[in-house]
Amino acid sequence: MTQNYKKSRSAYHQAYEVIRDRILNGDMPGGTKIVEEKLAAELGFSRTPIRESLRQLGHEGLIINKKVVQPTEEDLRNLFQVRILLEGFSAKSAAIYLPEEDLKSLSNCIIMGREGAIEEIMDANERFHAIIVQASGNALMIDTIDRMKSIIYLFRKTVVLYSRPRLIDEHEEIYEAIKARDGEKAKQLMETHLQEDLDFCLHILRSSSQI
């Protein structure tokens, strides 16, 4: 691998992370127009890593038609429909296959979800779902969720920042079903949990649009 190639990949990763983080933390809000030349000048990168970063962010659903995504109700419903299908199956699989050490990790996520600061709750929430998705053992399903993780983050932030009722209680119920090796119950609880997330996000979206 040549030195120039390594440098170009490093620049791509740096540019990608900066732009992604700006979108996720709200510095580049939904609807912001993306101008490649302006971003390159502002961030101090050449246009090639910026272009590659924007292509990846488009693949992840954060940039659509050269604008930062501004999810509609239909986008929300489509995203959660996929999550409900895949994560419901994953929860059922977790009840069968999840090893004891990962059960402990799920328990720790619940503790942090109750006691942590906002960023710690966000991390615990993401980790809780990731452990369960990994338990599916299905590489295609895991990859599908992984490619959605940035857009999922936006909605996960909504449910945490706006303190969705019973969020961590539902995690604990899912954990208890998995611990009891009750696959059908774990599946049903995960599906209900994600439907509650969807309904809450839709409520926030509608409330914001009326301001």
Image (cartoon, rainbow, N blue to C red):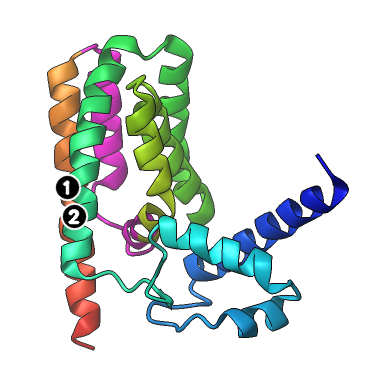
In the picture, measured across the screen, residue 51 lies left or right of residue 181, that is: right
Q: Is residue 202 above or below residue 70?
A: above
Location of the N terminus (image quadrant) = top right
Which residue type carries mark 1? Gln
Q: Where is residue 37 in the image (x, y as percent from the top left)?
A: 63, 83
Task: Determine the secondary structure under disc 1.
Answer: helix
Q: In this view, does 107 lie above or below 147?
A: above
Residue that appears at 26% across and 34% down: 87
The image quarter containing residue 111 is: top left
The image quarter containing residue 199 is: bottom left
In the picture, measured across the screen, residue 97 lies left or right of residue 6, that is: left
Check if mark 1's residue and mark 2's residue have beta carbons within 8 Å.
Answer: yes
Residue interval drawn in magenta: 155-181
Residue that appears at 37% across and 14% down: 98
Q: In this view, does 161 lie above or below 68?
A: above
Q: Where is residue 142 in the image (x, y as percent from the top left)?
A: 38, 32
- Mark 1–mark 2 Cα distance, whole angstroms, equals 5 Å
In the displayed orientation, state which residue is furthest to the bottom: 211
The image quarter containing residue 201 is: bottom left
Q: Where is residue 119 in the image (x, y as percent from the top left)?
A: 52, 54
Closer-to-camera residue (176/101): 101
> Which residue is label 2 attached to?
78
Label at residue 102:
none
